[in-house]
Amino acid sequence: MAIFSSFLTGRYLRISLLDSCHFQCEYCVDKNAQHSSLSTSVALTLNELSLLIKSLVHLGLRKVLLAGCEPLLRGDVIALCRRIAHLPGLVELALLTNGQLLAEQAAALFTAGLSRIGVQLDNPAALAPKARLAIDAGFSAANAAGFRHTTLLSRLPAAAPAAQLESLLALALHHRLDLTLISEDVKALAKTLGNYPALATKGAQQWQLAGSADTQLQLLPAEAQTPAHLHLTAAGTLSFENKKAPFLDLKNTLAYSPGSLIKINSVIREFMGE
């Protein structure tokens, strides 16, 4: 019961909708994968995803993050949002993207009920001109659609180059974004940021970017442990994000009990230790 209770009261569910992306970031791509994307026979269908999320919300889930690799490459992501965004008890439905397709889908995502958007981008200064234009257009479209507190997430090396930090700060200020910096050395990064006149300190890891009342900045350690954070992959595998717990193959459960919320709830509860 303790593990399951911790999940319900602590964190949220991260769903990898597929394993393909425009980019090949080393912390996201499985280097041992034999294929660049899941086959349709392996990946969870729209109906299966909807059923599983409905089941978890029924069990107490409150927040869902749609991720990928790149979730906007999946053609039914907007339909999925429509199905799950207004489930009773769900308080937030967020999406993590690389931003390349955001401009053309932001309005539809907002209408479908998506609550919040996060964009993973480590170094805007290193982007090709076409990709940078797509990012800018995506943030503008998200603001125009009605999204607020869109987050720019960036992983930084231990000694982040000044140009990289400056490009992230400038992008956040220009589009009124919240900025989350993920680093192996949070203390060193905080010290570096303290030298920037554009920042005013608000606690040890919370900052306000001068010139924008909307933009907040936070620092996170690269290896933050979140044992109550569940991860559901496109193939149906449910596991803990910290990789210390065994996994449960929900795709197999769905195959033997299609459409049965009672059976799915029972299997998940047993796996979680209730």
Image (cartoon, rainbow, N blue to C red):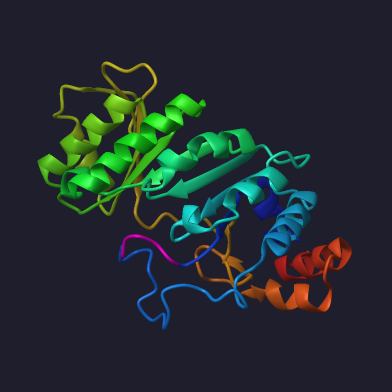
Q: Main secondary structure of the magenta part?
A: loop
Quadrant where the image shows the C terminus: bottom right
Above or below 116: residue 273: below
Left or right position of 94 against 176: right
Q: Residue at x 67, y 65 (%)?
A: 45
Q: Quadrant of residue 193?
A: top left
- Quick one: 226 or 211, which is closer to the camera? 211
Q: Residue at x 32, y 18 (%)?
A: 212
Give percent across and percent down for residue 253. 76, 75
Above or below 35: residue 3: above
Q: Is residue 198 magenta?
A: no
Left or right position of 84 against 172: right
Above or below 3: residue 147: above
View extreme (left): residue: 162
Give percent across and percent down for residue 25. 31, 62
Q: Residue at x 63, y 70 (%)?
A: 236
Quadrant where the image shows the N terminus: bottom right
One can see residue 208 in this view:
yes
- Looking at the rendered structure, the number of numbered marks drawn on it comes to 0
Give percent across and percent down for residue 149. 45, 29
- Quick one: 261 or 231, which is closer to the camera? 261
Left or right position of 46 against 127: right
Give percent across and percent down for residue 10. 62, 47
Which range of residues does the magenta coloring cover? Answer: 20-24
Q: Residue at x 41, y 39 (%)?
A: 103
One can see residue 229 in this view:
no
- Quick one: 154 or 139, which is closer to the camera? 139
